[in-house]
Image: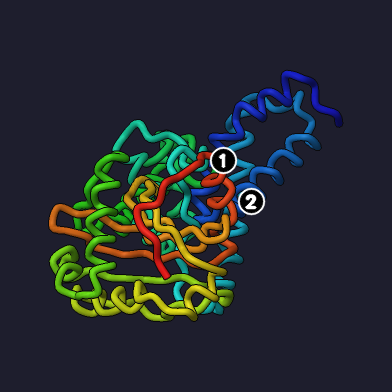
Amino acid sequence: MSLRTYEADLFENSRGRLEAIAYRLLGSAGDAEDAVQDTYLRWHAADRELIETPEAWLTKVLTNLCLNQLTSARARRETYVGQWLPEPVLAGDRMLGPADTVEQRESVSLAVLTVMERLSPNERVVYVLREAFGYAHREIAEILDLTESNCQQIYRRAKQHVAGDRARTEVDAVTAGKVVEEFLAAALSGDTEPLIRLLTGDAVAVADGGDRVPARRTPVLGALGIARYLRGLFRRTDAKRAQVGGNAALHAAVVNGGPAVLVEAGGQVVGVICLEATPDGVGAVRIQVNPEKLERMTRQWAATGPHHPLAQMW
């Protein structure tokens, strides 16, 4: 059944919202795009004359597609090589969706996206739709075919799981740049002491290389251990230059609402080091080097250039 112009426009006007929902649910921009495209195909094939509320229909279809993906993703991640981290997204990417409230901005932070991996699929859907998009419990209950009271219970449980004991600091682009500059100065100093002072005592570092790029397969805990790990990571060697195909340029960026070091080599983003800023210092370092999770960022970074690096590495 062919789409009339207003029906095609209606979907395109919803695409950004659908992508933002899917990204929060799946933690992957690529998977989110696929889910939205599948939603479009179902919209195209549906008898649209019978659809009273297109926005609700599209959200329900997308949510069910994401629920199916979440179930299969859990099985895949049991065999994932090393640590799994969400796909990072640059500031300005429409995948991030609305950012008017603290809750909306928090829901797309790497910290929350990582924690949400421990939620059940229904908990994740309820939390995202309620916290980030302001859906009423009645609306979410209809999407998931649950009772409203059951939906409310799921939301309370999910919120308790997601709520952490560390207060994260919201940063703008200028503040993020300062955090990155301080981090790079410490990391490139060749000494552990500046890094130890920058990190919180209970900080954690996690790296995701998948099965494509060598990366530490277990988290590093504590300021001293992370400082030693980062000192080795930033040490210049011919092997590292060969791995990325030449010299690497280090840039300051805002990724998922937080400060990040973007590593660029040969026109490609080859790594992103996301820093979780807290009132007490950097509480977490999340390193993404899996090339499959950096393809979109490479395109976005190239589209917003030219960029001037803060430093060169290797």
Q: Front-most of 288 and 24?
A: 288
- Judged from the image, the secondary structure of the residue bearing numbered disc 1 is helix
Q: Alpha-carbon distance for marks 2 and 1?
A: 30 Å
In which quadrant is the C terminus drawn?
bottom left
Element type where label 2 sits in the image? helix
Dot 2, crowdedness within 10 Å: few (<14), some or many (≥20)?
some
Image-based side of 13 in relation to 234, left or right: right
| Left or right: 306, with 182 as reference point | right
Q: Where does the image place residue 68, in percent across and percent down from the top left? A: 62, 58
Amino acid tagged 2: Leu
Q: Is residue 52 above or below residue 190?
A: above
Residue 144 visible in this rendered orientation of the protein: no
Q: Write down the residue under mark 2.
A: 65
Left or right: 7, with 233 as reference point = right
15 lies above or below 288: above
Compared with 135, 282 (above or below) is below
* Front residue (pair 44, 81): 81
Q: Earlier in the sequence, mark 2 or mark 1?
A: 2
Residue at 19% x, 54% y: name it.
Answer: 278
Question: Circle 1 is placed at which residue position?
Answer: 303
Kindly identify the amino acid type of the residue bearing the numbered disc 1: Ala
Spot occupied by residue 231 in the image (x, y as percentages of width and height): 29, 76
Q: Quick one: quadrant of the N terminus?
A: top right
Using the rendered view, name the quadrant where residue 129 is placed: top left
Residue drawn at x 35%, y 76% is 235
